[in-house]
Image (cartoon, helix red, strand yellow):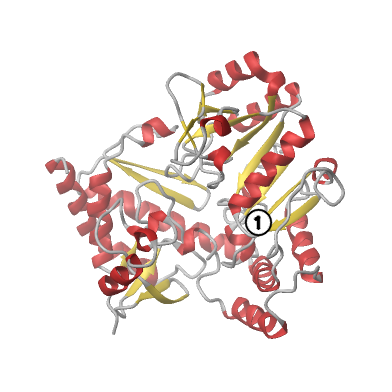
Amino acid sequence: MTSNEDAFARARRVIPGGVDSPVRAFGSVGGAPRFIERAHGAYVYDVDGREYVDLVGSWGPALLGHAHPQVVSAVQAAAARGLSFGAPTVAEAELAELIRDRVPLAERVRLVSTGTEATMTAIRLARGATGRDLLVKFAGCYHGHSDALLVAAGSGLATAGLPASAGVPASTVASTIVVPYNDAAAVRAVFAERGEEIAAVITEPAAANMGVVPPEPGFNELLRELTSASGALLIYDEVLVGFRVHASGWWGLEGRTVAPDLFTFGKVVGGGMPLAALGGRRDVMDLLAPLGPVYQAGTLSGNPLATAAGIATLGLADDSVYAAVNAAAAELGSAVSAALDGAGVPHRLQRAGSLFSVFLGLSEPVRDYATAQRQHTGAYAAFFHSLLDAGVALPPSAFEAWFVSAAHTGSVLERVVAALPAAAVAAGTALADGH
C-alpha cells in the first residue's frame, strides 16, 4: 500500500513541489501532506487508510458534507450523458436562475470554471464599463492568481501595488492600489485623491484569506457610498462566503443593506466541481461578449457535470442545512476557545457567519492583515499536528478559515472536542519555547 511519504515523493518527481496548489504542501506547518484517497460526510481518508474529521471541506464547497449521495447521483447521471459539449445546455440557465433567485441583484450571470476566472473577468468588466483603469483592493484579501490581483501591500496607508509573485510585471499591477482592510480613513483618502480614475473596488465582504476578519460596522456601506459617488463599481468577491454563510451569501447575512454592482461566486456554487460565476447589474453584465465589447470565453465554462453538482447542491442547501452548519461552527468554535483558555494560550477566535479561525499568541481583535501577520505561526503548527495525529484535519495554514458542514454533528464534533486539550497544550509549549 502506498504511504503518504511515498505518494509525496512520487508527486515531487513530476509536479513542482509535489502539489497542484501551494498550501497543500504543508509548507506552513511542516511534515508530509496527507494524500486523500476518498471522503464521505465529515471524514476524509488518506492513502495510509487513516480517517480524519475534515475541517478543510475542500476549502469551502463541502457544505453538505463530502460525497452527498444526491449530488453524486446527479453528477453520475450527467456523466452518462456526456462529459463536455462545447455548446449551450439548459442546465447552465437553470443554475444561473438558482443564483439569481438567491441573490436578485445578480440580474445576469456568467458561468466560468474557477474563482480566479470570475474575479479576473469582473475586473475587466468594471474597467470596460467605466473606461477607467485603477483598481482598489485590500491587503490580505485574496482574489485569485491573475496577474493584476497578485499584489502585496506597500508601506503607508495606501500605496501603489507591488508584485507579490515572480513573473508578474510591475506595469501590470501599477494600476492596483492596496489599502488596509477595515481602514475607513485610508479608503476615503484614496477616493479623495483619485476617485475619478477608479474603475472598481474589489473586496471580500468578510475576509477569509488572512484568517477570518469580519468587516467593521459600516465598512462595506462606506465602500458603496464612495464608489457610487465617484462612478466606480463595487465588486463583492463571495467565492468563499457565497452560499456558505447564508442562503444569499454574505450579502444576505448582512441584511441586504449594501448593493454591489458585481458579485463573484465559487466553491459551494459548483458543489465541489470546477465551477464559479460572476453576476450583477444587467446593464454591466450585458457588456460581456457576445452582446458587448468585453471579451470572456471558456471551453469548459458551464460544464454539464459541474452544473449538475451545483444545481443539486443549491437545491439541497435549505434553511435546515444552514442551521446545522451554524450550530456546528458555534459549538466547535466555543470548544476551541475553551481548550486554549484552559491551557493559558492567548488567542483570538474570529467568526464571519459559520466561518471562523483562531489567531494564536494574540489577544487583541484582528481587523487587518498587518495584525494577522503578528500571530504565532509556530504555535499553530504545533496545534495543527497534535490534532492531525488525533485524526482531525485542520487547514494547513494559520491564515485560512475553518470549514464545517451539515455532516459535522454528534460524535464527529465530540471527537474533535476530545482532541483539543492536548493540542492546546502543544500550542502553549511552542509559544513558551518561542518556536
Please state the horizontal and vertical placement of residue 259, each as a whole percent of the image: 73, 38
Please state the horizontal and vertical placement of residue 8, each as a whole percent of the image: 31, 68
Count of picture labels: 1
Quadrant in the picture for residue 412: bottom left
**Residue 47, placed above or below residue 331:** below
Q: Residues within 10 Å of mark 1 (few under 14, many from 20)?
A: many
Furthest-left residue in this view:
433
- The one nearer the camera, 308 or 123, is 123
Please state the horizontal and vertical placement of residue 405, each as a whole percent of the image: 50, 64
Furthest-right residue in this view:
291
> Three-letter amino acid code at disc 1?
Ala
- Seen at 67% across and 72% down, the residue is 312
**Residue 113, placed above or below residue 148:** below
- Seen at 64% across and 60% down, the residue is 113
Furthest-top residue in this view:
193
- Check the picture and name the quadrant holding the C terminus: top left
Please say whether residue 259 is visible from this viewpoint. no
Quadrant in the picture for residue 362: top left
**Residue 267, placed above or below residue 348:** below
- Seen at 58% across and 16% down, the residue is 189
Quadrant in the picture for residue 390: bottom left
- Seen at 50% across and 53% down, the residue is 354
**Is disc 1 placed on a helix, strand or loop?**
loop
Q: Is residue 353 left or right of residue 252?
A: left
- The one nearer the camera, 70 or 193, is 193
- Check the picture and name the quadrant holding the N terminus: bottom left
Please say whether residue 7 is visible from this viewpoint. yes
- The one nearer the camera, 377 or 135, is 135
**Residue 328, placed above or below residue 309:** above
Please state the horizontal and vertical placement of residue 90, each as a whole percent of the image: 82, 70
- Residue beneath label 1, please? 247
